[in-house]
Each structure stands twice: as structure tokens, then as C-alpha cells.
Image (spheres, rainbow, N blue to C red):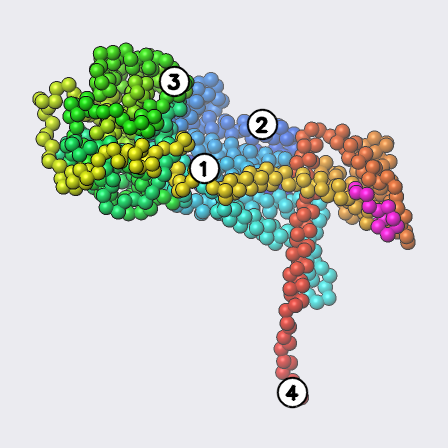
Amino acid sequence: MSGRARLAVCAAVATLAAACALLPLVDKATWLFQALFILTVQTGVGMAARRVPLARSLTVFAQALVTLLLLTLAFAREQALFGLLPGPEAIRHFADLLQAGSDDVSRYAIPAPLTDGIRLMLVGGVLIIGLAVDVLAVTFRSAAPAGLPLLALYSVAAGLSDGGADWLWFLVAAAGYLMLLLAEGRDRLSQWGRIFAGAPRTPGAEPGAVAPVRTGRRIGAVALGIALVVPLGLPAMNGGLLDAAGTGVGTGTGGGGTISAVNPLVSLRDSLNVDEDREVLTLRTTSENLSDLYLRIVSLDDFDGTTWKPAKRNITAVPDDTFPTPIGLSPDIKRAEVATRISAANWYAQDWLPMPYPPSGVDVEGNWRYEPLGMTLVGDHGQNTRGLTYTVRSLDVQPTAEQLASAPEPPAAIEREFTKLPKSLPDVVAETAREVTEDAKNPYEQAVKIQEYFTLTGGFEYDTEVDVGSGSRAIAKFLRDKRGFCVHYSFAMASMARSLGIPARVAVGFAPGTPQGDESVTVGLKDAHAWPELYFEGVGWTRFEPTPSRGSVPEYTQPDTSGSTLPDVARPTQSASAAPSTEPSQSESCATGRPELCASESPEAALVTSDDGPKWWALLAWSLAGAAALLIPLSPMLWRLRTRAARLGAHGRGEDDAAPHILAVWQELTDTAWDFGITPEESQTPRKAAARIVRLGHLDPEAAAAVHRVADAVEQVLYAPRPRPAAGLAEDVRRVVAALRGSLSRSTRLRALFMPRSTVRVVWTASDRWRGFTARLAALRPTFRRPSGQRG
């Protein structure tokens, strides 16, 4: 097998090795065999085209065409011409499959079912990456940049998987890439004729040729070690309101899940549109009113005109026993304590702990932190809810309509923070709010009228498939079209309430689930929900339900509560009533006595301690990482520029250093020709090497004369008893470089600049020094001679 054929096979194997990281994402591995077959054909076509040989562009075109035909045969045979040729119908079918695959990816948890759309995305993605690797590593003979598409393939898989076996797939992908590098190195060295000399294996023998595999193994081990160690020193990129695929607020590794989008508009829509209502949580509760048992994940209190998101707040240790009294709740409000035991599914990895609001205590294992203002728990150091069982004690707060209507003004800090609206918010939001609440006498009546506008009088329809767009005009479009789902209703009501001066925020979590025959309650993906919470002093944050046909309308917002059929609520328990009576609401507010509950300006939820902003070491680490990301790809170019400057410097003017200077200038000339594609022939004399550079470089007479002047100076160094300094050799080399650059294509010039071939001398130098170092170590070892066995 030729060197290029061997390199093509290694490129295909490296692609498949990286593609193995995608295996945990779906529940069947049959797609990999299909990708293997088509990738094998794609590689074979490339090998045949290069053997003909075809031009590089025609080789790539032939591979892409055969790949498209095979994909058409596999996925769009019925829509194709003659079952093979992709016509307009087949192209539309591909587009439909890709759209369906994209929807399936957002709907299903990991491992997802192998639908036709997902299968096309997997197989097609692997083939595109395989073609890119083959083109870079084989067609253009640059295996090092081929690691970028391999890294992209692995990164997509690692970013979506649960992280349990990422290290294994990394090793598999890294092994494939290193094998590709070794294959290219062996092929190049066989063409260059460069021999790695090793120590003689037997005393008195000449140094023999050592295969480049040993050096390649050393380089690969170092590269693999760096790839494994360097990420440990970089700060983790956390994020996600409902980020079940990342690490959330804490640091470390998280798990995978279905509700995984940072934007709740996307995550809730995808959860509500799933074909299979997959079970997320099961619970048992002492509450007699299951219709009010909402499981709250987090509150969104920062509105930037485009979306709502959680503000950055101080996070503390979870209180050992009883949580503090909720902000704004006075002892006059009736309440009962409810105990709820919740079990999360093994696939559901949520960084925030779903709990009824307001919680008064929680019994949970793991690393959790407490955010006081939202009264939420967030996982720390990769902690999430996967397979977790925990118990929450919560308050069933039961205000009356009269208590809400007579609520006093909220504290200044609460009003200032939770009535902020961006200037980009369309005027129609505030105008609609004023129009709807025209006859209201107090903030409570205004809130009830807004809720009734969405659920009863406004003509709105619940629709999870609607797309109201994004940006500041999204709410205006929703108010005009009157179609949307819970996110649109909650966003719109909270914005309208703020425009009227009522403190408001949006809560995200789950609506009440479905009761089962064994007295348990099941909460599924389609129970994912968002609802507004409005603040009334004396009651605190109060839930409203503007989404029609979803959840339950709170009893305290109904016009006639005397005839309510809801069950009578138990009297307050000792733990629920005694504590609030000794700590009045005013002392618990952000404005008075509890400054740690106040929000900061930052628009993201994050784990903070005593100060705001990134740590100095995080900034330093990211700065170093950015510098490394910039310098590493440019290091070959920088090394060549520095080497050229040193070789063509202002030395060699005296007889003592004339020889080193002339040899350095000759080395620079041959390395530059090498960078431009003229590989060196070390067995040739300087005169023959110069003639070869002139011939292959198509140099003009002036540049050719410059090459021969440098070669003559080298011959004088090699054969003359006392070599004399030769003036103008550096200028001769610069003249030759300019001539070579002008006679070659732009792609060759760019290749010579950013990926010069002569940088392989760094590897050779490192290998020689390592070999010398090990030889010196071996010489220092004491030798012990075995007795000859003869007797004296």
C-alpha cells in the first residue's frame, strides 16, 4: 500500500474514532455501520482519484458526488430520479428530514430514539467531517489542521452527552488523530529521505536508522498529556437557566437532560411539544389541594426587553432547619405547612431543585446552595437532580381577596428593582395594561383584570407551535396575534404589571402533575410551565395564572370565593405560624435589615461569594487561554520568522565566523524552498541542489544567479582550506525568496507562511537532544561485570 493510501485509511479510521463519541447520544448504534460503509466508499473514491491522478479539486468533487449519491440512495430513494440521482424532490426531502431531526434533538432526552432525521444528521455529519479530514490530511497533505474537524465532531458529542465516559471517547478520538499524524510523518520522512539516527545497538556498530514511530509516540504522548491537563487549569464555562446539560451555577461536570436550553422560551416550547410525555418527577404530598402544587425551579426577575432571566445574587449555605420567613409575608395571613417527597427521573439532571413555593425547609443529599431572595436551591460543583429523592416542607399560603386588595405600598427597594422596564419595550404594552385595568381601584384589581384579559375576555388562544419571534417586538406581536403558550402569557403579564408599578417577576418550573391510583403524582415534560408572580406587601410574592387551559386559577383571584368548591384548608401548624409571628415582614425585606437579599446589576445567575465580578485568576486564566489559542496556530510562522532573522543577521563579516554564516544562509535558502514545496535532497551537492531549486522554482536569471552565488560560497566552506567571507549572501537569499513567492499560487504562499514544512526541524532537534540526553544518562549508570566463573 502506498503512503497516500495508508494515510487515507488512517484519516477514515480517525474520523470513525471521533464519531464513536456520538454513540451515547442515541439508543441504537446501527447508524455507525451505515456511516462506516459510505465513509469506506468515499475514502476508496479518493484513493482511486489520486492514483489516476486527478486534480485536487476534481478529487474532492468526485468524493462529494459519490457521497451525495449514496446518501440519496439511503435516505431519499423514493424521491430521487431513478432512485439514485438527487432531484428537487430529493433535496426537499433532505430539508424536511433535517428539520425533523433538529426538532427531535430538542425534544428527546439522551439517549434519543434513532429517528430518520437524527440518523441523517449523524451519518451526514460524520461523512462531512470525514471528507474534510481526507481533503486536509491526504489531498493537501496537512494532517495537523485535520484535527480541527475531528475536534469539532468530538466537541459536539461531548457537549451533549452526560459526561460519564467523555474521557474514554476522548482517548479513542485522540488515538485516531495521533495515528493520522504518525502516518503522515512517516510518509513525509520517506519522501524527504531524512533518517533519525539512533545509538548503535551493538558495540562498534554504526548508528542505524530508527523508525520515526518512536519519536511520534513521544510527541503524541506529550500532546495527549497537554490536551488532558490544560483544561483542568481553565475555569469552567457554566450556564443555563434550565441547563440540564451543563454545570449551571456551580463548577464541575453536570449531566444531560431534555430541558436544556438557556432561553426558557425555547426549552418550554420544546418540552411542551414532545410526542412522548416523558416522566420527569414523581411525588407524594400531604397537600389536600393538588391544583395549587406548582413545583418552582427558579424565578426570572431581570427583563432586558428581549427575555426574562435570573439576576445574579448572593448564594449561601442551605439553612439547617427552617428557612427564613418569605419576604413580605405577615403573620396575619393564613397558611398551612405541607410536606412533599419528590423523586427525579434518572435521566433528568436539573441544576436547580424543583420545590413548592415558598419552601420552609428541605431534606436533600448532595452539594446544594441557597439563594435567599428567590428561596431556591442550586447545585454546586456539578450537583444536579439526576435520580435524586428529597423532601420539601413548604407553606400553603392562603390570602383572601380582601387582604390582597388592602395591601400597603411595597418597600422602596422591592418597587425600584421589580418594576424596571427597558426603554426598548413597545408602548403598546403599557397602553394595553392601562386600557385593560381602566376601572381597577387598586393594584390587586389591576392584576386580576390583566389575568382575566388573557384567560377570559381578550380572545387569546393557547398554542405551543406559534412563533412570535424574538427581540423587543415579540410581546407586541403576541398582544396583536393573541396566540402563544405559557412563556408568552407570563412574560406579557409581568411586563404589563411592571408598567403599572406592580412589582413582578416570572417563575419557571412545573404545573401540577397528574394524580395516580397509588396516591402519587406524576409530573411529565408537558407539565413544564411558566407563570407570573406579583408582589403584595403582607402576602409576599403571589402566583397568578394568565395562561388559558393551563394550571389552575388561584382561588384568591376569583371574584366570588364564598361559593368555592375547593376543600377547606387545615389550620396553620405550629412551625408555620409561630415563627412568622415573631419576625414581622418589614424586617425581612430587601430595604430593611436584609441587604443580602438585594439583587446586583449582573443579568446572570452565578455562584458568588463576597465580591462581584470575575476573580483575578479567572481573568488571568482566560487571558492565557486566549493568548495560547492565538499563538499556537501562529507558532510555526513565528518560529520561521525568528529563524530567518537569525540566519540572515549581521554576523559572518569576519573570517572566524564566515563558515557558520554561509552555512546558515544556505540552510535558510533550502528551508525557504522547502516551504514553497521544493523538498530538499540532502544527498546532492550544493551545486546540484542549487540547479534543482532554480529548475523547480522557475526562477528568473537574476534569482538563479543569486542561488548559485550562495551555493558557490557553501562549496568554498566545504572544500577551501580557509573560507573567506562572502558579502551580500543575505540579500541574495531575500532576492530568491521574492522570486519564489512571485512565481507560485496564493494558496502555496499562504501555506508557506502559516504552515511552513521546514518546521519539522523542531521535531528533529528535539529528538536529537532527547537521544543525547538519554545517552548521557545511560553513560552515567554504573556497569556491573558478571564473574567469568574462572578460578585463579
Q: Which mark is residue 613?
A: 1
C-alpha span from label 3 to label 1: 28 Å
C-alpha span from label 3 to label 4: 105 Å
Q: Earlier in the sequence, mark 3 or mark 4?
A: 3
Q: Which mark is residue 425?
A: 3
Q: Secondary structure at mark 3?
A: loop
Q: Nearer the viewer, residue 15 or 396?
A: 396
**Residue 656 covered by magenta stretch:** yes
Q: Secondary structure at mark 2?
A: helix
Magenta stretch secondary structure, dominant: loop
* Residue 15 rendering spot, x and y as whole percentages: 51, 39
* Mark 4 or mark 1, whichever is nearer to me: 1
* Mark 2 or mark 1, whichever is nearer to me: 1
Q: Earlier in the sequence, mark 4 or mark 2?
A: 2
**Residue drawn at x 47%, y 41% as measured from the top left:** 615
**Residue drawn at x 78%, y 32% as measured from the top left:** 738
Q: Are marks 2 and 1 in contact (CB under 8 Å)?
A: no
Q: Which residue is mark 2?
A: 61
* Mark 3 or mark 2, whichever is nearer to me: 3
Q: Which residue is mark 4?
A: 791
Identify the image quadrant of the C terminus.
bottom right
Q: Earlier in the sequence, mark 4 or mark 1?
A: 1
* Residue 271 rendering spot, x and y as whole percentages: 31, 29
